[in-house]
Amino acid sequence: MAKNISRRRRTPCTGTPAAAAVAAAGQEMKAAAAMATLPASPCSSSSSPSSLFLAPNPCCWKAAPRATVRASAAAARTLSSAWELPGPSAARPAARKPRLEELDTTNMLLRQRIVFLGSPVDDMSADLIISQLLLLDAEDQTKDIKLFINSPGGSITAGMGVYDAMKFCKADISTVCFGLAASMGAFLLAAGTKGKRFCMPNARIMIHQPSGGAGGKVTEMGLQIREMMYEKIKINKILSRITGKSEEQIDEDTKFDYFMSPWEAKDYGIVDSVIDEGKLGLVAPLAGAVPPPKSRVWYLWNASGPTRKIMKNLPSEEKLIQNVQVETMGSSRRSQQLELTMGHRLIVVLLLALLVAGAALEAEQAAGEDGVRGGADHQEAGTGGLSRRSFPAGFVFGTAASAYQVEGMALKDGRGPSIWDAFVKIPGEIANNATADVTVDEYHRYKEDVNIMKNMGFDAYRFSISWSRIFPSITPYANLYHYDLPEALEVQYGGLLNRKVVEAFADYAEFCFKTFGDRVKNWMTFNEPRVVAALGYDDGRFAPGRCTKCKAGNSATEPYIVAHHLILSHASAVQRYRHKYQHIQKGKIGILLDFVWYEGLTNSTADQDAAQRSRDFHVGWFLHPIIYGEYPKSLQVIVKERLPKFMADEVQMVKGSIDYVGINQYTAYYVRDQQPNAKILPSYSSDWHAAFVYERDGVPIGPRANSDWLYIVPWGLYKAVTYVKEKYGNPTMFLSENGMDDPGNVTISQGVHDTTRVAYYRSYITKLKEAIDDGANCIGYFAWSLLDNFEWKLGYTSRFGLVYVDFRTLRRYPKMSAYWFRDLVTGKN
């Protein structure tokens, strides 16, 4: 935004060419002429309202005292921007005199309580806007005043005058942007009455800091710079209050020109709704002003008197619309159409203003709708016929994240190190040696992220509480463990390999139940315990990095020991919750299990048996004991004495220890039988007696995402959910994770246009609906993930988020997939 800091004495005089234009307006213009009465003497010291329509005469600046001339010279170095026209000075010619039809059109806009800012914000335009606002407010303080903005910005002092007038008015000021609202234009757009700030879908909004220069003596420069900083701080404070952003974020965002789409401006807090292209229409009392079909627009106001001379030259309504369309086709086509005069253009603006005003009122009154749309791209994406109504009553849509991946603030505010803090410090273990010390800083930005979820219409947020920190959230689904075991337990007694961890986890869980249980009604003990045991203790790819071929570990025994302790820890925490808290807090508790669907490569018995073994060693390793009190038979037969046994009291504690189960489902693989080679050392992975295959007869099982393990196989979700239904008695379940990733190096423009992710979600959720229709007791769906974040072994080379995060600035940009979910969960199809 720009500001004129020079103090110029206004010395009005008569004899301007505009005076003749006003005098010639005739009887029809008496009201406007009365508002624009000229001063009687050339150098009157009183203020004149002539600035409503007339530009200051350059001759007045020449007659000013020497100090004023110096200030006028400083105006050439005024605090301005590329979006501003400098204020009046001796070097600037007088403004163009207004046309008769221009002034009359302004009056006609005022009759509809519409004020139009369609130029840079300078002294002249600001005085006109202020006078119109005060006039309309004095006329009726119970009706809204509509301020339409198409402005590149301008002077801060002039703009602040308009801002103060808006706040002075008792009537609500509804602001609407079409075209451009930049700099001071964006500031005034945001200054409208909350809930009544709108934007057209093809508009652009830009904010930035004041820009300009200082010159003259050193002391004068110091004064000017101090004034610039004062105005910058003042503007930032007002924007912070209007948008809800912190002053620090406003300061960071306005260091450079920060352009926004209408939907980004809505998320930022500058506007409240985007008026969809398909929602233009008129509502009372404006509907009564619409001309009948094929009538001439001028009859809208019963033109009479001198204006009839203009009327005969006006094109028909159809021709007006044709010419407006031609404006978008480029200059090569414009010569073929009738050239609109300035007066005609303003009539078109008025017509559009009436349309937009009706649409704005409709958007304001629409129940449960705040206008977020994703433009043509989002409309083209479509929900494939899916909507919230496609799912059972009470079905929950949410997003998911984990503390370590998004929180940041490692080792601060009381958080101790976890095993992942130690693991990421091992050179070469993580892509580009990345860490999660900052990641996407949700620790400080959680309110912003929750607002994003609310704006997208999600019901719930599935997050994890960091055992090594402890913290809350839209309806919370709290997971107690997501890979981040406190390093202190690893050092003291070997962490998950020691039976002591069962009691330690139960104590930690009880603390969370006691502290947060009045707000959290949905608990999960562990996320993907199979991944913890297999990747952390079988192949060593995850923390703590133990395996037979690693510096320490035993892939034949440790995965099973860790899994056993995880199951007992889960059951012990559930037992405490049910005995001490559930009857009071009325919550539910379960566990989150990952489940890749395994399909036999062929119909041979060997391959079909291999597929079933794979399902046993994957989801059955944990779900089978929880449902039936024992490990699957295939594990008992193959692992034998390496597989820990449950004691009788433990069976009772473990069996039935869920109110629901979360299924993390991403992909599917073909599987073929592969009996172990005698030379291969025993391990959890070799115990499967199976090999993964990613294609059949040369045809891939599905397109591959960025990660080498993630193939897009929607039918795999249907089969996985149906399998849990049939194999484990149709427990209450929800899809606790589902998503796909893009490369980490995609640009913002590439990242937000995530059409593949939209297709992924559409196809997977369609298959989920089919499974529900076939009887699966599924109560919710959580997309992984809300934000691009730290992706464990991949660091920041993988992006799963619905929201693109610039890892340098941490700024959030909702992707097309976020708006697709918005359409899905709000019922816009």
Image (spheres, rainbow, N blue to C red):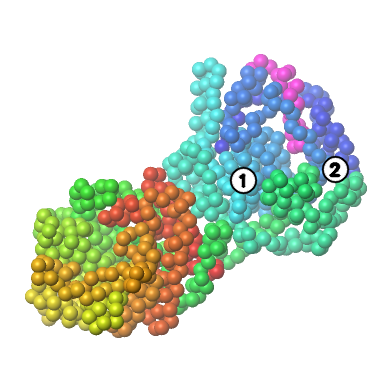
Residue type at numbered disc 1: Leu
**Residue under the point 59% across and 25% down:** 77
At horizontal 53% and vertical 45% (from top left) the residue drawn is 259
Q: Is residue 265 above or below residue 729?
A: above
Q: Which residue is mark 2?
A: 29
Residue 690 location, quadrant: bottom left
Q: Cβ–Cβ below 8 Å for labels 2 and 1?
A: no
Numbered range of the magenta stretch: 45-67
Is residue 53 within the magenta segment?
Answer: yes
The x, y position of residue 652, in whole percent, is 17, 80
Toward the front, the furthest residue is: 697
Q: Which mark is residue 180?
A: 1
> Which residue is nearer to you in this view: 261 or 492?
261
Alpha carbon distance from label 2 to label 1: 31 Å
- Residue 142 pos. (x, y %): 68, 55
Instruction: Indicate the position of residue 341 as horizontal and vertical percent values.
Output: 79, 44
Magenta segment includes 441: no
Mark 1 packing: few (<14 Cα in 10 Å), some, or many (20+)?
many
- Relative depth, front residue between 403 and 39: 403
Quarter of image, res 180: top right
| Residue type, mark 2 in image | Met
Q: Looking at the figure, which quarter contains the N terminus?
A: top right
Residue 445 falls left or right of residue 386: left
What's the residue at 37%, 80% (across, down)?
777
Quadrant location of the C terminus in the rendered image:
bottom right
Compare marks 2 and 1 and give the one earlier in the sequence.
Answer: 2
Label disc, if present, on residue 417 of the rendered structure: none
Q: Within the image, what quadrant is residue 678 found in?
A: bottom left
